[in-house]
Amino acid sequence: MSHNIKILPGATVCEDCTLEGDITIGGGTVIHPRVTIIAEGGPIIIAEYCLFEEYSTIIHKKSDKQENPPKPLFIGAHNVFEVGCKLESPCGHIGESNVFECRSFVGVDVKIGSGCVIGAACSLNAPQTLADNTVIWGSEHHNREALEKQPSQMLQLDFLSKVMPNYHRLRKPNVHKRQTSRQSQEPIKA
Amino acid sequence: MAYLTQPDYVKYVCSCGQLKPITNLYFCRHCLQIRCAFCICHEVDSHYCANCLENMPSSEARLKKNRCSSCFDCPSCFHTLSTRATLAQPRQSTEQGSGDTKVENKQPKKMYYLSCFNCRWTSRDVGIPDQPVASGGWPERANPYATRVNQLLDYYKAIAQQEKQEKLDRERKKFAIRGKYITLTDKTGLTGAMARNIAGLPSSESSSSAIASFTPSQASEEVEELPEEFYTKELNLNQITSMPQRLASPEWQPTHVSRLHPIAKLLSVKRSQRCRVCDHNLTKPEYNPGSIKFKIELLAFYHVPEVKIISYEPIKPGCTSALLLKLTNPTGHEMQIRLMQPEDIPEPEERVDEPKSIEKSLEKSLNLEKDTSWYETVKRKPILLTECRITIPDVTLTLAQRDDAAEYDDDATHDANDIILWRKSNKLALRLQVVTSGEAQAGAAAGAVLALQYRYRNAVPPAAQPPRDHTLHAALRLHLGPVCG
């Protein structure tokens, strides 16, 4: 497996986290320590201003009917992955401004739109597609539709990106321009 | 012993016959009886909001329909709503457009809305405008049936008033001293009310306008037809409210999520408990809603020896198994305990020997034939028959008083023998034998019963008297798992 982690400038990625495979981390994203992101079934692309809290796990699972070249998992901007949540990545795409609350679980074959909230300890296993602004909460997995997207966590992200360097070793951004194509960056770091 | 998430393995028998864990029981120091929530009198001490801890006198609480005026519950998931602040764009305030706000337009203005952290419902979802102040000022929705409800209230109030008046009249008539002179009505046996009745007039002053003008509601057989769209339109369950959501606001019963409205938070009450037999307080909380302390706290946990199961051998039909129990003396006085079978507990005799002070008899006379019929209906015989029988050793155990400093001493007295396993300050472990009858069904729950006879020193009331020792009894039922095959 190729270890090819691209961190764009402005991202705050702690050293004490497990990143495996082909991962691109967008600017402004904050990754706390003890986060696990494993791209075994294909590359993972994380857009800007996402927040990964401690013990959140993102896995792009290998599947039998894998396309070649493997399809990337794209995680949109402003997603929040709270402490201990797990995303066993589905096919492809996660919208933006979603909140995965503490210890939530999203299984394979779940498509997630934008502005969704997976409540604390909720687990989604069955194949399904969440429409935009769906909110799921409670032990009985009640759901409802929110009127608007969840407010972004910009203040929190700003604060973390300022404070985090004081207390944690960080991985340095290794891609300096967004425009540079992926191929040219590949040999830089392994 | 009671556990939060596990079943109660040891249950005590309350004086009313209910089986409860010791932590749910009270101990009346005046009757010297175990009481439980089922057989005592619960009284409301004060109303308060559990969210903002604001105290409210009961008259005000009634006026506000037992709801807090500043706290709200989520209409979607019933969690408490939180107030969130946002900075409103200046553009918005120009739209609202008044001359005064133009000066403030330069700085963004803080606006507040309600939001639920559980299901992420916000007051914006249903179009409630943001408020410029953090608390209060939320628009209240008028009850569409307010006039009818008030009408009904007035009507029933008037009826209650009338009945009260009639009762008073009757009382007065009973005790009315006949005057010297015989009035005309007395002579003819005609009362004023009767005379009015005969004359076809409405009966005297008691009937008020509220009763006269009241129109009872009519049930009709015709019901509106369902609109066509119920059959044709596709249903979006996300737009429809659930039954609990509708029932949470009975005045409006919104059928559509867009009509949900924050629910004013229901008030909580602080309760005090009173023994129904002697009318003494068993618990009395402190008035301040923020405080969780009690002024009076007569819990069985502080007065009755506690029994815990340490371990036991599996219960088999026709076999004898060992049972290890721990006894704890929670009181500040030495305690003698004897174990016995529950059926050997002597029937409590009427305590007639008690000296009756003037005060007490006065209290009695004030109570005007205290109604004790409730006790007969409440009381029941506990089911204490089990297939397991504990062999009771004929010993008197002495338990030292509770001493919080004792855990630092380690000179444990070693008087261990066949029965006493170990002893440590106010605790002591016992080894007992449980004989199970051969008829016990495998798989059924095994329970054993045990009674304690203990010397209890009543130190507190009344202060002038020297502390008196009493011999009290407590029966309890031990849950010993299933019977093994």
Image: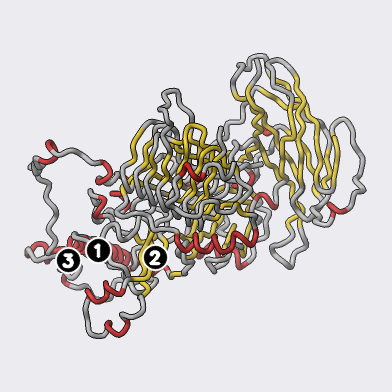
Which residue does the numbered mark 2 point to in the structure image? B68
Q: For the residues labelled 3 and 2, say whether their Cβ atoms are less than 8 Å apart.
A: no
Between discs 3 and 2, the one toward the N terminus? 2
Give the residue at x 63% y 17%: B440
Confirm whether circles 3 and 2 share one chain: yes
User: What percent of the width, then of the height, locates residue B330?
Assistant: 74, 51
Confirm whether circles 1 and 3 share one chain: yes
Q: Which mark is residue B1?
A: none
Q: Left or right? Give the position of B293 relative to B129.
A: right
Q: How many marks?
A: 3
The correct choice, above or below, for B82 with respect to A25 in the image is below
The correct choice, above or below, for B351 with respect to A62 in the image is below
Q: Left or right? Give the position of A30 relative to B27.
A: left
Q: Nearer the viewer, residue B318 or A86?
A: A86
Toward which corner of the image does residue A139 lie, by quadrant?
A: top left
Which residue does the numbered mark 3 point to in the structure image? B210
How far apart are labels 3 and 2 at the CA level?
Answer: 30 Å
